[in-house]
Image: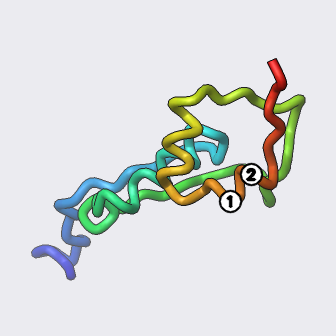
Amino acid sequence: MTAPGGLPKPRLEPEVVVLGAGIAGLALAQAWQPQGLAAHHPLHLVEQSAHLAEVGAGIQLGPNATRRLVAWGLGPALEQAVSVPQA
């Protein structure tokens, strides 16, 4: 739709742009969907890399973070990719 004068009609719903598909960016994108926020505030995840891959020595996630990942349905994928310290 266009406004008077042929200009594009401004969007009333703000869009959200997340820069980077690291842990925080992917977590935000995952959390955004089930809340129904995407219907009113579209989220765009932007990453400069052409593909996602392991980088660095790894990360450590505490119990609160891993519980959230399991709640998002990522438990089976985590079980295949993690190592758990013995002590």
Q: Quadrant of the C terminus?
A: top right
Q: Amino acid at mark 1?
A: Pro
Work out whether 79 lies above or below 67: below
Q: Secondary structure at mark 2?
A: helix
Q: Which residue is mark 2?
A: 79
Q: Percent x, y for residue 63? A: 57, 29
Q: Percent x, y for residue 1? A: 21, 82
Task: Please give the name of the residue rendered at 71% of the width and 58% of the height, measured from the top-left corner.
Answer: 77
Task: Please give the name of the residue rendered at 85% of the width and 45% of the height, measured from the top-left corner.
Answer: 54
Task: Please give the name of the residue rendered at 36% of the width and 61% of the height, measured from the top-left corner.
Answer: 34
Q: Nearer the viewer, residue 4 or 40?
A: 40
Q: CA distance from mark 2 to mark 1?
A: 5 Å
Q: Is residue 22 left or right of residue 19?
A: right
Query: What is the number of the mark on residue 10?
Result: none
Q: Which residue is mark 1?
A: 76
Q: Residue furthest top?
A: 87
Work out whether 40 lies above or below 8: above
Mark 1 Cα shell of 10 Å, populated few (<14), some (14-19), many (≥20)? few
Q: Amino acid at mark 2?
A: Glu
Task: Please give the name of the residue rendered at 72% of the width and 27% of the height, measured from the top-left corner.
Answer: 60
Q: Is residue 46 left or right of residue 44?
A: right
Report which quarter residue 2 is drawn in: bottom left
Q: Percent x, y for residue 43? A: 42, 57
Q: Percent x, y for residue 78? A: 71, 50
Q: Are marks 2 and 1 in contact (CB under 8 Å)?
A: yes
Q: Secondary structure at mark 1?
A: helix
Mark 2 Cα shell of 10 Å, populated few (<14), some (14-19), many (≥20)? few
